[in-house]
Image (spheres, helix red, strand yellow):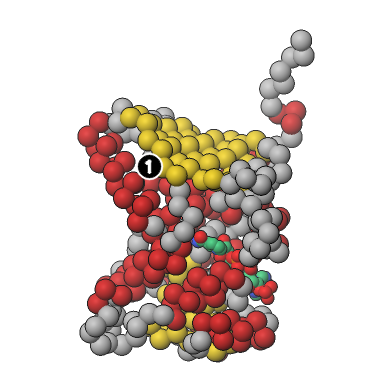
């Protein structure tokens, strides 16, 4: 089967049948609206545990229908795009992969390493294509900056450190995530952490050791030691005080010190690019992709290590003597 990319839309060909697993805001506003607008995709609909929400999501994008029976939707598709809470995403992604369906994943892949391992094993055994939609890595302004940083490192020497700060707020009036139970429970570490790590993984060698300290609200301050000596840090919160929301990345080394203010728009454009790569990889029969389930699992492993270090008792830290 030859599947056509968005750039190749004028030529006719078999279309990839895709459904979204999930019925929430991100499922319909991003995944569903992007997939249903593409001429190279036969958009089948939304699966959710609530029939009304699944039908509503389909009505919002004006294509496909709602499903509550997972086997029925898996029978009807070649691929699924997943926008569920991460603890639900992992087992369903593994189930879809075992059924021979390609999986477009969202971040984080899972909330523990064992669940992520299950997805990686299912994808590898079935030989399906997987791709993790790490938004920044599909936003043109970010990928252009990362390309420049790669060129500078090649010309001047490797980067010696990097830092990412992601401060958002699900308490902003009108936030579509204000009722997101998993974000309330797991905070910035698990919501922003995959985005921050997608940048740090692109700039620096693999992470070997992790340490962290909790700040106020849900803020996680995490330090990472990378192979060969570079050190990076990330500061992450989904409950930043009003007026303090901002996300930046900085990198330094012999090639200078460079900072990028991370974009907040172009999310659906990024999703289109991710779907382009997903469709191309499936058409090529390419089973491994730089942003596949194994990459997503490496992110979960760092977040899991950070979570464990953040949970250590205060007595295990150095106390500053009182004057
Ligand atoms: N790449 C990005 O930039 C980006 C941006 C936003 C979100 N996301 C990701 O997209 C995913 C979904 O995000 P969200 O904002 O929609 O999360 P959310 O607001 O917490 O919504 C969770 C969704 O999961 C469903 N769900 C929860 N428990 C379930 C269960 N046991 N069985 C079946 N469905 C269940 C909910 O269905 P009910 O309504 O029936 O409870 C709802 O559709 C997350 O992984 C998030 O990180 C990524």
**5 on left or right of 127:** left
Judged left or right of residue 9, residue 17 is right
SS for callout 1:
helix
Residue at 31%, 27% (x, y): give it: 254
- Residue 314 % position (x, y): 74, 31
Q: Quadrant of residue 312?
A: top right
Specify whether 270 is left or right of 117: left
Q: Which residue is drawn at 71% across and 44% down?
A: 217
The residue beneath circle 1 is: 203
Quarter of the image where the N terminus is located: bottom left
Q: Is residue 185 visible?
A: yes
Residue 5 x/y as whole percent: 29, 75
Q: How crowded is mark 1: few (under 14 residues within 10 Å), some or many (20 or more)?
A: many
Q: Is 105 positioned to the left or the right of 140 in the image?
A: right
Query: In x, y percent, where is residue 96?
Result: 50, 76
Image height of 245 relative to 228, above or below: below
Question: Residue at (54%, 75%) from the top-left corner?
Answer: 28
289 shown above or below 20: above
Toward the right, the furthest residue is 322
**128 w.r.t. 261: above or below:** below
Which residue does the image show at 56% across and 86% down from the upper left? Answer: 59
Say whether residue 208 is visible. Answer: no
Q: Quadrant of ligand 1?
A: bottom right
């Amino acid at each position: 089967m030859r599947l056509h990319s968005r750039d190749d839309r004028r030529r006719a060909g078999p279309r990839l049948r895709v459904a979204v697993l999930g019925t929430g805001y991100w499922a319909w506003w991003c995944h569903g609206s992007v997939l249903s607008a593409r001429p190279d995709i036969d958009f089948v609909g939304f699966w959710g545990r609530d029939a009304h929400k699944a039908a509503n999501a389909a009505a919002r994008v004006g294509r496909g229908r709602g499903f509550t029976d997972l086997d029925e939707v898996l029978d009807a598709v070649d691929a699924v795009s997943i926008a569920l809470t991460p603890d639900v995403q992992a087992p369903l992604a593994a189930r879809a992969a075992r059924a021979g369906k390609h999986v477009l994943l969202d971040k984080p892949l899972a909330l523990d390493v064992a669940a992520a391992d299950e997805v990686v094993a299912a994808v590898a055994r079935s030989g399906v294509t997987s791709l993790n939609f790490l938004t920044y890595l599909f936003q043109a302004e970010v990928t252009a900056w990362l390309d420049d940083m790669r060129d500078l490192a090649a010309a001047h020497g490797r980067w010696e450190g990097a830092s990412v700060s992601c401060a958002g707020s699900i308490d902003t009036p009108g936030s579509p995530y204000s009722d997101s139970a998993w974000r309330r429970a797991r905070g910035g570490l698990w919501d922003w952490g995959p985005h921050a790590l997608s940048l740090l993984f692109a700039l620096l060698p693999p992470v070997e050791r992790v340490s962290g300290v909790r700040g106020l609200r849900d803020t996680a301050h995490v330090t990472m030691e990378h192979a060969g000596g570079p050190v990076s840090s990330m500061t992450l919160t989904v409950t930043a005080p009003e007026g303090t929301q901002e996300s930046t990345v900085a990198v330094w080394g012999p090639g200078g010190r460079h900072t990028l203010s991370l974009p907040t728009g172009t999310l659906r454009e990024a999703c289109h690019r991710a779907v382009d790569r997903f469709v191309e990889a499936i058409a090529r029969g390419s089973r491994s992709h730089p942003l596949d389930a194994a990459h997503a699992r490496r992110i979960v492993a760092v977040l899991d290590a950070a979570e464990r270090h953040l949970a250590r008792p205060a007595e295990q830290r150095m106390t500053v003597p009182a004057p």
